[in-house]
Amino acid sequence: MITMKAFGTTPPCAKCKEVLRRVNNVAARYPGRIEVAKLDALSAEGDKYGIMSTPTLVINDRVVAVGKLLSEEEIEKYIAKELEGAS
């Protein structure tokens, strides 16, 4: 199971909402293989990753984007790498 964590602000900013939408769209292409979590950057979980800017995307405990929006295609490339590593 791949875990994607989308860290944003509360209330969420436009970019934070958009990263969550994109992450959910990508996850929908891999039913049952990806778990998505929406988390607040100002939380214990956010502190764990040293988040200083939002949105931040973490895939399988690896920070892949900080303060920028990845396209769905970019997110999917990270997922493909994780799936290759799991085989």
Image (cartoon, grey):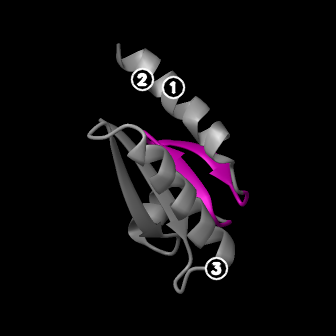
**Label 3 vs 1, first from the N-terminus:** 3
- Mark 3–mark 2 Cα distance, whole angstroms, equals 30 Å
Query: What is the three-letter code of the residue carrying label 1?
Result: Ala
Q: Is residue 51 above or below residue 40?
A: above
Q: Assess disc 3: are there few (<14), some (14-19) or many (≥20) residues with their C-alpha within 10 Å of its C-alpha.
A: few
Q: Which residues are magenta?
A: 53-68
- Mark 2–mark 1 Cα distance, whole angstroms, equals 5 Å
Query: What is the three-letter code of the residue carrying label 3?
Result: Cys
Image spot of residue 72 (x, y percent): 62, 45
- Residue 13 as seen in the image, left or right of residue 85: right
Q: Which mark is residue 13?
A: 3
Badge 2 marks a residue whose secondary structure is helix
Q: Assess disc 1: are there few (<14), some (14-19) or many (≥20) residues with their C-alpha within 10 Å of its C-alpha.
A: few
The residue carrying mark 1 is: 80
Q: Nearer the viewer, residue 61 or 81?
A: 81
Q: Are marks 2 and 1 in contact (CB under 8 Å)?
A: yes
Residue 50 appears in the figure: no
- Mark 3–mark 1 Cα distance, whole angstroms, equals 28 Å
The structure residue drawn at horizontal position 38% and vertical position 59%, both measured from the top left corner, is 37
The structure residue drawn at horizontal position 49% and vertical position 45%, both measured from the top left corner, is 26
